[in-house]
Image (cartoon, grey):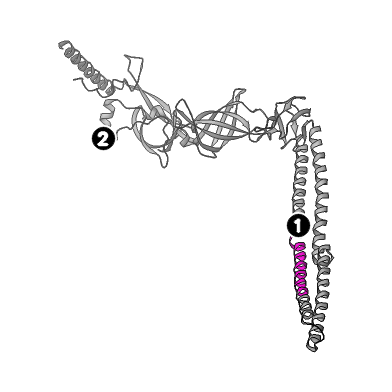
Amino acid sequence: MKKRTILIILAVAAITATLVWVVSNQSTGQISYETAAITQQDVKVDITATGTLDAVNTVEVGTQVSGVISAINVDFNDKVEAGQVIAELDTRTLQTTVQDAKANLNRTQIQLKQAKRAYENAKAFNANSDSDLSIKEAQANLDKTKAQLELSQKTYERNASLFEKGVIAQADLENSQADFSSAQASQLAAEVALNKAKANVSNVDIESALAEYESAQANLVSAQAALEKSKINLDFGTITAPISGIVISREVEIGQTVAASLNTPTLFVIAADLTKMQIEASVDEADIGQIKEGQLVEFTVDAYLDDTFTGTVKQIRLQPSIVNNVVTYIVIVEADNPEMKLLPGMTANLTVIVDQALNAITIPNKALQFKPPVAMESSQQESGTRKLVNRIPGHTEKGSGKQQQIWILEDQKPVPRTIRIGITDGINTEIVDGSLSPGTPVITNVVLPKTSSKKTDNSTSPFLPTPPKRR
């Protein structure tokens, strides 16, 4: 315990002696300062990321029908035009399907003609129903019963007259009366039979003919659709380029069998225009809030390390990607590729320009972080000067800028200045307002007098306030 007390006393004595020595040396002008000049340059705030290059529009060409590849007309890197034949399948099976569909169509057309003729005959027959045999027979039977009725009526009336005169017996009168009544009943039955015959022609024959005709029409439509489908499948046997572009992938060879089922097989990959490329960049969740559409992007690829390419942010996709608890978002960057140097699949190292100030008056961040010695700070406090507020490296201020105190060297003496600062790239910071011109020296550090040739680091400088004692 006593040893610890002794060490504390010695440390306090050493610090006190150092302060006295500094003050005395400063008064004699032996303290010097390390300075840096105010400069004029561009300041950029950026975010780095990596991504993969790809064509803006890429189409996978497949086949909708199964078959054997009989011809391939293009190869890797070939330029193709929309509609150009790039491959062919063996179409013999497809051609037989077309022929069968044509035969089926002809058959349904004949059936339709027959059903139509039967329907038209039924309608015509209904309009002139007397021509039907069953109706003719019923009509003849009715005519016969009418004649019998007329004859029996005359016989009955004549016998009634004769009976009144006493010429015939009553039995003969009754027989003629019975014949007359029977003839009336026969006529009524004949009329019912005729009406029934006419009803059968109207309700049965016409409805049946109409149903068969409509069924034949539906069969014709189905046969036409089957023929069209078989023709389309035959056309699919000839594979054409859907867009104009460059073949960047070929997945098949002549003689290979391709089966089109639930998943369409990919035969070729065509890139529409390799003079326009896009990059799918992965941006960390901590930086995604600073990314905006239209921002300038600079990037390099390993194939051309000395070249810097440019692009713009086109899209920020909202779907996150989480790998090992690291959250990233996909940012799409569009870039021109007039010299065709950029190829699909290349890895791009991107720098997204979040903010920038061109030809700005700048100050080194080291000068913003400078904290004056205790004696200098005390003298300035006595004269009413504000204390220094440390500048955070890499921090960006918006609007009119944040006030900051710096120290410049005038006539070999430190003088405080208050400035407004803007954006920073972590090394230099933009001066928004401060009436300082390029070349003005600003203090960045204190250099010890003759007794030491080492530069004083602010974090370990003896001019900083004495740390509190341990208890």
Mark pair 2, 1: CA separation: 115 Å
The three-letter code of the residue at mark 2 reads Ser
Q: Residues within 10 Å of mark 2 (few under 14, many from 20)?
A: few
Q: Position of residue 370 (x, y in %)?
A: 35, 27
Q: Is residue 321 visible?
A: yes
Q: In the rendered view, tell whether residue 429 sits above or below residue 34.
A: below
* Residue farthest to the bottom, as pictured: 165
Q: Residue at x 80, y 89 (%)?
A: 165
Left-right relation of 97 to 55: right
The three-letter code of the residue at mark 1 reads Leu
* Residue farthest to the left, as pictured: 2
Helix or strand or loop: what does disc 2 sit on?
Answer: loop
Q: Position of residue 229 (x, y in %)?
A: 75, 41
Magenta segment: 182-205
Q: Position of residue 177 (x, y in %)?
A: 76, 78
Q: Position of residue 115 (x, y in %)?
A: 80, 54
Residue 370 belongs to the span the image colors magenta: no
Q: In the rendered view, tell whether residue 190 sits above or below residue 260.
A: below
Point out the frontmost of discs 2 and 1. 1
Q: Which mark is residue 210?
A: 1
